[in-house]
Image (tube, helix red, strand yellow):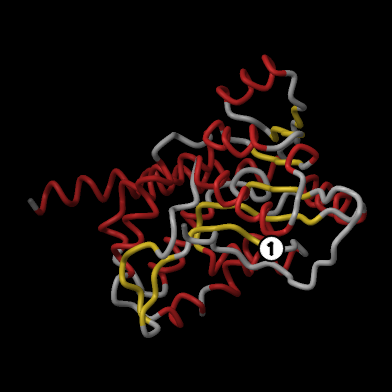
Amino acid sequence: MNAPAQSAKSGQTEHSEPRIAVFFDLDRTIIEGSSITRFGLAAWRAGIIDVRHIWTELGRAALFGVAGEAKDVADRTVPRLLETIKGRRRSELMELRKPLVEEMLREARPETLRLLRLHARMGRDCYLVSASAIEIVGALADELGFAGAIATEAEVVDGVYTGRLAAPFRHGAEKATAIQQLAAEKGYDLSLSFAYSDSYNDMAMLELVGIPVVVNPDSRLAAVAYERGWPVVQFAHRHHRLVRRLRTGLIMAGAFFAGRLTRRKVQ
């Protein structure tokens, strides 16, 4: 079995007390909106991908940023993005990291960051968990002070993307699998550990830990949290952030439908 794609600090020492870890989802938990959409648009602006090939996926991902995650958004978007970067050098995408990370830092939820700092002060290792690319997620995790990151790793041969995955796509149940591997390696007691997410798609991750916390949950996750008595955290949306999310979602949705109409005309 492949080890999870992660960037984690080494030098851990053994503790007589149980080791506790904290796992934070990225999209709509740490940041507002979709990191996959941000990555796709940044790669398009840099001329690395032809966004016309992934109108549908980016349109859905943008709508997720406003309305919450549909089950197949990440499942469809990331594989298509992998196809479009096939043959490109990894160094090209690495150049996108700094502006992308800076943008996500500006959009980070201050309430979630306060929770992150609280857990860190209590000596708990915190990890950022996402289906997005490890190149971006790992850099963001470093900037925010996480112990490491679990994310999707694209296969690279001789510095060039092959269009395939190097390890399982870290979405849904695969997030939980990667966390289990990490816990076994580091000696974390998952029954005492925490997980934060907004999405029903992260049920496997939430069920894996002893203390699941849902943040601004989608309707399905809210229902489950109510039935099981899980803590629910509702962060108020600042007006300017909500307006920006709605505007971005509408622009991307419009671009998505415009792209479909253009393709139909060409055909």
The residue drawn where x is 39% and y is 75% is 156
Taking 231 as reference, is 20 above or below it?
below
Q: Secondary structure at mark 1?
A: strand
Q: How many residues crowd around disc 1 within 10 Å: few (fewer than 14), some, or many (20 or more)?
A: many
Q: Which residue is nearer to you in this view: 73 or 42?
A: 73
| Residue drawn at 39 percent across, 38 percent down | 72
> Which residue, as the protein is rendered here, is positioned at the far top?
227
Q: Look at 43% across and 80% down and name the residue there.
A: 92
* Rendering coords of residue 55 (x, y %): 31, 51
Q: Is residue 157 above or below residue 127?
A: below
Q: Quadrant of residue 208?
A: top right
Give the farthest residue toward the bottom. 158
- Pick the front one: 256 or 129: 129
Q: Is residue 39 left or right of residue 238?
A: left
Picture coordinates of residue 47 (x, y %)? 35, 74
Using residue 5 as the reference point, say whether residue 62 is left or right of it. left
Count of numbered circles on the image: 1
Q: Quadrant of residue 225?
A: top right
Residue type indicated by callout 1: Gly
| Residue at numbered disc 1 | 148
Q: Residue furthest left?
A: 267
In-front residue for pair 219/11: 11
On the image, the x and y values in percent for residue 260 come to: 23, 46
Percent x, y for residue 94?
A: 51, 77
